[in-house]
Image (spheres, rainbow, N blue to C red):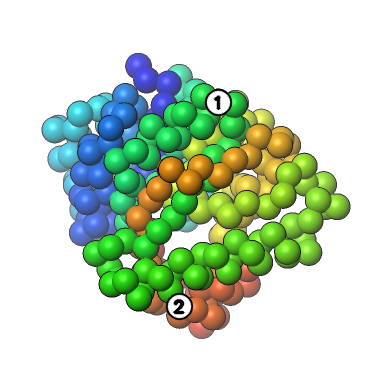
Amino acid sequence: MSSLWVVVPAYQEAARLGATLDALAGQRDRGFTLVVVDNASTDGTAAVAREFARRAPFPVHVLTEPEKGVGCAVDTGFRYAIARGAALLARTDADCLPEPGWTAAARDALGRGAGLVCGRVVARRDEHGPLGRAGFRALVGAAAFFGRVRPSHRRCHGYLVPYRMHAGNNMAVTAALYEAVGGMPRRPSPTDRLFLNRVRRRTTAVVRARDMVVGNSTRRLAAYGVAGTARWYLGKGSGRLGEDPR
């Protein structure tokens, strides 16, 4: 069995999950096991995953996590994989499109000593034209800059390494480090930043891999707008919209 396991949390993604699974099937490195964690969907998400499992070029496990929240689904998937021998873990989301070299880049970075790998996110080409994608790049750049200068992210708070832009839908981590830091917080959102900061207090082995690329959905940006999205990632909620639109 492969040492690399890929986890995909999914909630109400019957319409989009198929494209994500096809992107994973198109990886150059297909020596991994896939876990799709259905987060109590009611729209047939699990059925899409099970149908894919019958033709997938790698083993596929489909789980159900009844506790709502992406952190809950990710933690359940990672711990399931670790219990079955996973040494290396990668994650993307059910509305994202990993580029063909994604799993190879994750395996390579972890194999060279990284504990946590933060990949590069770009806007999905099927959702926006050139101007929209350029706007997304600018927003990601602004978020990365703010993360570096944010007072609560400075090393004086016990961090061993500077802040790096970390998108939960494009990450890889060793199973040993995942367990050492207590895993992904199951809540509150945004759990990705909380997890990154747990890791930054534990190790300096946090790297950014520019060749580990995922096409990111911009549905949150469309639902919240620029200001609402910024509020979400700052941990202040999204204002009147409340829940993550996923």
At label 2, the amino acid type is Tyr
Q: Position of residue 23 (x, y in %)?
A: 25, 44
Q: Residue at x 32, y 46 (%)?
A: 99
Considering every residue shown, the one lying at the far bottom of the view is: 240
Q: Position of residue 12 (x, y in %)?
A: 30, 59
Q: Which mark is residue 112?
A: 1
Check the picture and name the quadrant holding the C terminus.
Answer: bottom left
- Residue 190 located left or right of residue 133: right
- Quarter residue 84 falls in: top left
- Quarter residue 27 falls in: top left
At label 1, the amino acid type is Arg
Q: Position of residue 124 (x, y in %)?
A: 32, 61
How crowded pointer 2 is (Cα within 10 Å; few <14, some 14-19, many 20+) is rated as many
Check the picture and name the quadrant holding the N terminus.
Answer: top left
Q: Residue at x 43, y 74 (%)?
A: 135
- Quarter residue 36 falls in: top left
Q: Of residues 147 and 94, which is closer to you in this image?
A: 147
Could you tell me how many numbered marks the image carries?
A: 2
Q: Which mark is residue 224?
A: 2
Q: Of residues 42 and 205, which is closer to you in this image?
A: 205
- Residue 101 located left or right of residue 189: left
